Amino acid sequence: MDMLTLALEPESSTPLYEQLYLHIRQAIVDDTLTTGAKLPSKRKLSDFIDVSQTTVELAYAQLLAEGYIESVPRKGFYVLPQEELYVRRSDNPIKPLPQKKTYTFDVYPSQIDTTAFPFERWRRHLKQVVTEENRDLLALGSVQGDLVLRQEIATYLYHSRGVSCSPEQIIVGSGTEQLLPQLLDLLTDAKTFGIEDPGYPLTKQLFEHQNRHYVPIPVDESGLVVDRLETERIDAVYVTPAHQFPTGTILSVSRRQRLLNWALEHQTYIIEDDYDSEFRYSGKPIPSLQSMDQNERVIYLSTFSKSLMPSLRIGYMVLPPQLLNRYRERYRHFTCSVPRFEQHTLAEFMANGDFEKHLNRMRKTYRRKLEIVTAAFKPYEPTVSITGASAGLHIILSINVPHSTETLQHMAESSGIRIKAMEDYYIRPQHLHPQFLFGFAALSEAVLPIAVARLMSCWNVTKGGTSTD
Amino acid sequence: MDMLTLALEPESSTPLYEQLYLHIRQAIVDDTLTTGAKLPSKRKLSDFIDVSQTTVELAYAQLLAEGYIESVPRKGFYVLPQEELYVRRSDNPIKPLPQKKTYTFDVYPSQIDTTAFPFERWRRHLKQVVTEENRDLLALGSVQGDLVLRQEIATYLYHSRGVSCSPEQIIVGSGTEQLLPQLLDLLTDAKTFGIEDPGYPLTKQLFEHQNRHYVPIPVDESGLVVDRLETERIDAVYVTPAHQFPTGTILSVSRRQRLLNWALEHQTYIIEDDYDSEFRYSGKPIPSLQSMDQNERVIYLSTFSKSLMPSLRIGYMVLPPQLLNRYRERYRHFTCSVPRFEQHTLAEFMANGDFEKHLNRMRKTYRRKLEIVTAAFKPYEPTVSITGASAGLHIILSINVPHSTETLQHMAESSGIRIKAMEDYYIRPQHLHPQFLFGFAALSEAVLPIAVARLMSCWNVTKGGTSTD
């Protein structure tokens, strides 16, 4: 080591020991201090460069800890062998993300109305949860989610969906994306899953990510064509009975009966995704499939994404006893992915009746928007006809014009409208009359008729119902 | 339908239409109304039972929606066929969860000190984030986590860990449990993973859950035995270089160099888990492996579980460009599992310097506790010797008494002490001298010496270092 050039700067913000450490490290890396070289003793070095012995000690300790030198008892400190670091600069540029287009009117079906969220109430519950008295909430809670939240969910499910379950059957997680893979992992015996076609694209993707085999099962005006489960030799099925996504059909009672009998006969499971059952605008809510099941064959799955906010990332599933036992065996060392502060805030929000109030308010809000939209499309009948208008946050437009779906979509985009075609939801390509999903939740009551008019005008659909094109 | 028994109760809280619906539904289910039976016209029925036509309309609409009846245009409403629901009561009781024992002293290594969390500051940021102005946060954000948080993490990583990355390389998720499976999914080419032995049990479990093959690689006083990667034909490796869990060893600089060269040569990846690097009590922090890597071969993984709270469920990984591109392709339709309110609260907490302040405070707290614990064990040397005391939230006790690990653990439990044996972290069973992890984070400064004394007494270790047993 070139002790002569070793000039430490006492005024520097870098501590002296660190300057010394860096100096010696550099000498080792540069091979000025070669393998096996002996470092001066702490006393000698501290004398020589006029620093305290502690400074040298700290520097040597750091070099020791990182493995640059070794300490040989009663002999001293020696430089350890280094390996040359090879550099082969690879050229892997980060691909830029596709530019997000901005649209004047976004009627994609995934959105909610964010203007009516009760921020003040949510903040109040947050404030009560995030306190020194609740410091236990900093530690890990139950892997299934905290009991207080599961109790609220069980009560809610019983009253609003007829779902009969104990809180211990509930697993709280960060939505379907996180819960469905866990569930598939429990359904080890099922080799072939049936999923709805058309259906929610993420479902298909989750099955693919988990390398699980699925077969698309068609959906007609009575919902999933249950008879196909036998002919396609399906082992387990994923279904949205109350409000099929995206068609909006309700699984008829006879199909439900057949489906439940099928599951009993094959001793298998039905995954019921009840994703937006809160929003039905006429009559009573459609009962959940789970409420009809007396044989522990239905796994009930739902989320707060539509009812509260997509960004909350809280969903849950209700497991029949046999699967619950399997879950507990397989996941007992895991952790619930939902933050506990958030779990308890939601539990408070539900316990205080704020959730129910919010749902009632949103149901009114969405019903009003639905009425506005259907009224706005009315004059364009029969070129445009509407289905799926009894529930959920979107309607389906069937368009009778001499253009392809692709052309219509392109026309809408050119006019600043982001709209999703029904075709996109099919797994098996269909030759359909053009159909589109019109999500009415996010746009305001004032804007909705303007959006409808713009869409009709860009598609050259005129009132009275004939296309001018 | 037995119209004569049909008595609606106008005073009931159940709406009239629902009473009528329930009555007819029951008749269909009971087969009193058989398949193909024609229902009375709406007008006729409303006249007969003296309710408004709307009431009948609503009841029929609900029956129609659920598929109990069909409407034949210009003819009327007909009962649809029902299928009998079979019931085969299966007896699958829910297995009770093992009773959680309570311990007087819990020195498991997974815990943190919860008494010093800055609740007031956290609440303040929460209050600023959860506001009407931020209603956009109710909708979904970036799948990688919101940019504002990724920017804060990138800055923090650069300054505290020397990690050089852009915010776009960061993926925010609900901790290692959620991020590691995603990562394994990207590392499709790697057939055999090397993982540290001993190591964090969850790592092993995550590989098993994902059906990925791993080989345990031994750890010695210089950390992972890197040479074994070649002999065991490892394709990719998972390592904790700064503070090996649970041994506390630091991966020496020459091993780091060899490891990086190995990854470059095989064009593969090193997963660096930097899980508790914030807490080092002497000298400078040990540099991250990522900071030494110039060939985009290191995936950096860390979490806020130790530095803030386990129940926050926020972790992150830094992907090299090639993997980032693959991630974006594979996960572009997915959603970040961390709630956005929480992401923004943490970002504010970091931006305002609160995170750094908290870390400094906790480092002091933990250093003081470490000193108390080492001082408390001192009189029991050499029967008890301590290692791993320069970093982290636990130390390792090596016990030289004529008892097996199992016996010692049992003795501790009988005395109300929950303590984890080193043996439990080995994948390949070892015949070790008894070693235990003593987590000192959760107990108070006053309680720590009492816990140590109780442990020593239950193991019959006396001061002066000889066992009386």
Image: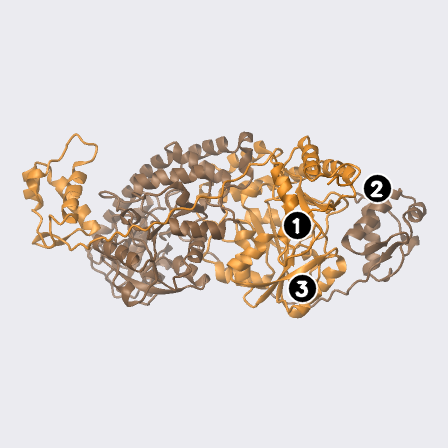
Chain colours: A orange, B brown
Q: In this rendering, would B236 be left or right of A1?
A: right
Residue shown at the point (67%, 42%) measured from the top left: A438
Q: Is residue B159 above or below residue B292?
A: above
Q: Which residue is mark 2?
A: B11
**Distance CA(mark 3)–CA(mark 1):** 35 Å
Q: Position of residue B85 (x, y in %)?
A: 74, 64
Q: Amino acid at mark 2?
A: Glu
Q: Please say whether residue A278 is visible from this viewpoint.
A: no
Taking the image as drawn, is residue B137 in sight? yes
Between marks 3 and 1 in the image, the one whose residue lies nearer the viewer:
1
Q: How many marks?
A: 3
Residue kind at label 3, given as amino acid type: Asn
Q: Determine which residue is flagged by label 1.
A: A422
Chain for mark 2?
Answer: B
- Could you tell me which quadrant the N terminus of chain B lies in? bottom right
- Residue A387 versus residue B137: which sits nearer the camera? A387
Q: CA distance from mark 1 to mark 2?
A: 46 Å
Query: Identity of the amino acid at label 1?
Result: Met
Q: Position of residue A173 (x, y in %)?
A: 53, 50
> Considering depth in this image, is B269 or A427 the residue closer to the camera?
A427
- Residue at image location 64% in from the left, 62% down from the top: A296
Q: Residues within 10 Å of mark 2 (few under 14, many from 20)?
A: few
Toward which corner of the image does residue B402 lie, by quadrant? bottom left
Which chain hosts label 1? A
- Mark 2–mark 3 contact, CB under 8 Å? no
Which class describes the residues within 10 Å of circle 1: few (<14), some (14-19), or many (20+)?
many
Callout 3: SS: loop
Residue B462 at x, y percent in the picture? 23, 56
